[in-house]
Image (cartoon, grey):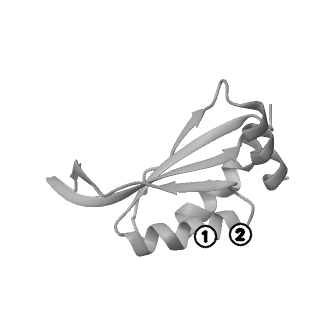
Amino acid sequence: MSDDICLVLTTCPDRETAERLSAMLVEQRLAACVSAGSEVTSTYPWQGRVECESEIPLTIKTTRARVGALKQELVAHHPYDVPEILVVPVSDGLDEYTQWIRDWIQ
């Protein structure tokens, strides 16, 4: 259903980018909440080399109906050529919290 809750996971190269993207997504009502985590170290292959970089993980709370627009905005405003964007459906949650997400997004 279009009002099903989803988590969208991404990473940012620094705290400033994380804060800028988080504010943009909430202001545009593409997300009800974005949680920025502590710095992590990501190891991954890129252009024939193994890279090891510090990143800030974001957990974005939204609805299925907003995922497409949210992905477009992330791609348009993210500094990475290919940003991590993973969509995780939420099968259950506190009714009052999931309704709060829906109320902000709609």
Residue 78 visible in the shown view: no
Question: How far apart are labels 1 and 2 at the CA level?
Answer: 6 Å
Check disc 1: other Cα within 10 Å, few if <14, some if 14-19, many if 20+: some
Which x, y percent locates residue 31? Answer: 68, 55
Q: Are marks 1 and 2 in contact (CB under 8 Å)?
A: yes
Q: Residue at x 58, y 41 (%)?
A: 7
Residue assigned mark 2: 27
Looking at the rendered structure, the number of numbered marks drawn on it comes to: 2
Q: Residue at x 73, y 67 (%)?
A: 28
Could you tell me the amino acid type at mark 2? Answer: Glu
Write down the quadrant of residue 25 in the picture. Answer: bottom right
Relative placement, left or right, of 88 versus 79 is: right
| Mark linked to residue 23 | 1
Check disc 2: other Cα within 10 Å, few if <14, some if 14-19, many if 20+: few
Write down the quadrant of residue 95 in the picture. Answer: top right
Residue 74 visible in the shown view: yes
Tell me the quarter of the image containing the N terminus. Answer: top right
Q: Residue at x 70, y 37 (%)?
A: 5
**SS for dot 1:** helix
Could you tell me the amino acid type at mark 1? Answer: Ala
Q: Residue at x 44, y 72 (%)?
A: 17
Which x, y percent locates residue 50? Answer: 14, 51
Relative placement, left or right, of 55 versus 71 is: left
In the rendered image, the vertical position of residue 80 relative to residue 10, given as above or below: below
Which x, y percent locates residue 24? Answer: 63, 70
**SS for dot 2:** helix
